[in-house]
Amino acid sequence: MISEANTRIVYMDNNATTRVAPEVLEEMLPYYSDFYGNPSSMHTFGGQLGKKVEQARKKIALLIGASPEELIFTSCGTESDSTAILAALQSQPGKRHIVTTRVEHPAVKHLCEGLDKLTGHKHKVTQLQVESDGTIDMQRYEESLTDETAIISIMWANNETGVIFPIEKMVAIAKARGILFHTDAVQAVGKIPINMAKVPVDFLSISGHKLHAPKGVGVLYVRKGTPYVPFLVGGHQEQGRRGGTENVASIIGLGKACELVAAQLDDENTRVRALRDRLEEALMKAIPRSILNGHKTDRLPNTSNISFEYVEGEAILLHLDRFGICASSGSACTSGSLEPSHVLRAMGVPFTAAHGSIRFSLSVYNTEDDVDYVIEHLPKIIADLRIMSPFWQEALKKEGEAGSCGCGCK
Ligand code: PLP
């Protein structure tokens, strides 16, 4: 709970969801009030909205270097992921092998793990191990591919650590073997340059609410010529590729958001990256036994995942919350359970560190003041929690540091 006295909010949980940009909201509002028609209607009042949907499609295509016809609107990143993987399997019934990683978002991980139940067929799923810095060994990747592989589904950037995978190299290897490639780019689009003309993936997933558009709208990119089978079957919307009346206002909002993030990409990769780096360096300097999770440089510019050993992440979040600071422990989808994150476990982060991991994910709306505010409060929170932690006291004793004040000073 945010303390009632505290009115300040420092939002550093942008990998969970982002603020709808004011320009996006403004663009959307008339489509709830004045222009509420159905784009499939014969009358002009509804039918004219089809043009607006197509304009939005063009803006999104421009951001990722795709053709507008290659984009299908969906309800979210999860739907895009499911659609891509199931389409690849259904269009190649003889192939039942999937290559993915141990650090995928549950939208891919749980789908792949539950495929047998869902389709009634046996599937072999290879979940690639990652290195301790969250990167992938390319030789291991290459060796995992077989003639039975129907689809490779590997995320562009990890939601918990921000680690970026070498998708361009991975796709080149897949193409040489004639294997379809899907990438969950939900965290990457809008934060780093993505160009479908240069990286020939077959499927790519986008989610609106990660890039300052509203929740409840997503996109699946399907390269021209890639075999495709719809997931949601119904009306003729999206040229029969995805049934369901279009979420017109949100689609228009997503188009505007893509225009904005394209213009802000430089800011994200310079100013936001510098804010993130300053936050990370200051916290790690001020707080002993803090460990950076993820590769130092092959990382999204906005994400920092730090473990503070011998404290519980959930407890840190509650204390940050008292100051109106919003961050995550593990991923947003796993917080609420005390299981350490599957991503950190796959990276081999020790139990005592995985439990105390905090993810800060910034956006273009963050300021120097926000960073100062977190640097001002977090070291004291960790020191106070450690004083109460029997594990911390135990660790200090073991290291012959008994008698220290508990804040880690020697
Ligand atoms: N993939 C990744 C990498 C994500 O981070 C998320 C959301 O956290 C999703 C997929 C799911 O997206 P959505 O919430 O739009 O279903």
Image: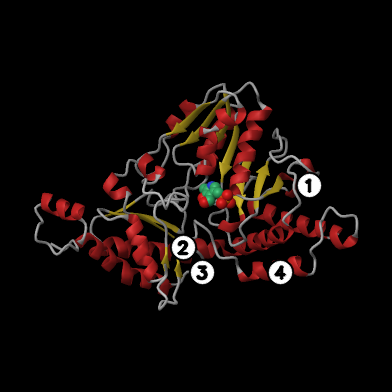
Q: Name the amino acid, label 2.
A: Leu
Crowd tier of the residue under label 4, counting other residues whose Cα lies within 10 Å: few below 14, some 14–19, many 20 or above: some
Mark 2 and mark 4 in contact? Answer it, CB < 8 Å. no
Q: Residue at x 86, y 57 (%)?
A: 47
Q: Which mark is residue 237?
A: 1
Q: Identify the residue shown where x is 59% and y is 24%.
A: 121
Which label is found at residue 216? none
- Secondary structure of residue under mark 4: loop
Spot the residue most to the right: 43
- SS type, badge 2: loop
Front: mark 2 or 4: 4
Q: CA distance from mark 2 to mark 4?
A: 26 Å
In terms of secondary structure, where does tag 1 sit?
A: helix
Q: CA distance from mark 1 to mark 3?
A: 35 Å
Disc 4 from disc 3: Cα separation: 22 Å
Q: In whole angstroms, how far apart are the C-alphas of marks 2 and 1?
A: 36 Å
Q: Is residue 293 left or right of residue 240?
A: left
- Relative side of 310 to 149, left or right: left
For the N terminus, give its image quadrant. bottom left
Q: Amino acid at mark 4?
A: Leu
Which of the labelled discs sits on residue 362, or is there none?
2
Of mark 2 and mark 4, the one earlier in the sequence is: 4
Q: Which residue is mark 3?
A: 365
Decide which of tag 1 and tag 3 comes sooner along the chain.
Answer: 1
Label 3 – label 2 distance at C-alpha: 8 Å
Kindly identify which numbered label has been placed on residue 29: 4
Left or right: 375 as drawn, with respect to 193: left
What residue is shown at x 79% (from left), y 63% (from top)? Answer: 36
Q: Label 3: state its secondary structure.
A: loop
Say which quadrant the C terminus sits in: bottom left
Q: Residue at x 40, y 49 (%)?
A: 337
